[in-house]
Amino acid sequence: MFGFLLLGEQLAGDMAARQAALAPVPKLGRFLQTQARQEAFHAVVFQGVIHWLAPRGVRTPRHPSMERYRGLMESALARGDLAESLLALQVLLEAMGDVVLEAIDAGIERRNLGFRRLRHVLRQQEQMHHAFGVHQLDSLVSTSDAHRVQLQGQARNYLEVIDAMFAELEGLFLDFDEDPSDYRHAFRRRLPVWLAPA
Ligand SMILES: [Fe+2]
Ligand SMILES: [Fe+2]
């Protein structure tokens, strides 16, 4: 699970840095640069956790879905489509990540393992990134139906991969003694209304 999160943080950091370069206004660019730094910090945290749990090293399983996700995002950025990249990273992937973090958080809390302040800061930052993306795209879809329809179409590709991510993590969720389908619901609840299925 932490290996999956580490890959997600690395992807988020790389992509936020590239988004910053596409930002049309300085304020947007600054937010994205800050996000890129925060994601790099999160990656270090998870690297530390992995090392702490498995000091002699561990063979981390591959996550082909994360690689597919990266491929989709890279092509959006190569086209200069900042809106699609905000949809993919801040709106969708961060919502997915928050579901995973919430599960881990609850597990750590139950076992009284501490790190309360660190966990709080981390989730707060992720939620800010998500809210930022939702806010940006909310204003975009409110200006035109064409934007909304386009984003809905683009979202389908990413949602398919996110579904594959949940499938890859299924066994790990079962280790938390919980129903994996609850996590899919928790994810859907985090999506903006214009992405909810009709
Ligand atoms: Fe992060
Ligand atoms: Fe984030």
Image (cartoon, rainbow, N blue to C red):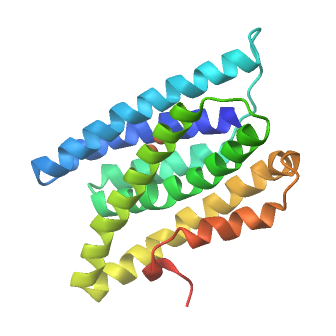
Q: Which residue is pictured at 83% across the width and 47% down the height?
A: 176
Which x, y percent locates residue 14? Answer: 40, 36
> Measured along the vertical axis of the image, is residue 166 above or below residue 37?
below
> Measured along the vertical axis of the image, is residue 134 above or below residue 42?
below
Question: How many marks can you see?
Answer: 0
> Measured along the vertical axis of the image, is residue 179 above or below residue 50?
below
Q: Extreme bottom residue here?
A: 198
> Measured along the vertical axis of the image, is residue 115 above or below residue 23?
above
Q: Quadrant of residue 146?
A: bottom left
Q: Which residue is pictured at 45% across the width and 77% down the height?
A: 152
Which x, y percent locates residue 111? Answer: 79, 36
Q: Quadrant of residue 88?
A: bottom left
**Along the line of sight, which residue is nearer the eye, 164 or 188?**
188
Which x, y percent locates residue 48? Answer: 60, 19
Q: Which residue is pictured at 43% across the width and 51% down the height?
A: 73
Which image quarter is the C terminus in? bottom right
**Along the line of sight, which residue is nearer the eye, 110 or 107?**
110
Which image quarter is the N terminus in? top right
Q: Is residue 119 left or right of residue 41?
A: right
Q: Is residue 100 left or right of residue 17?
A: right
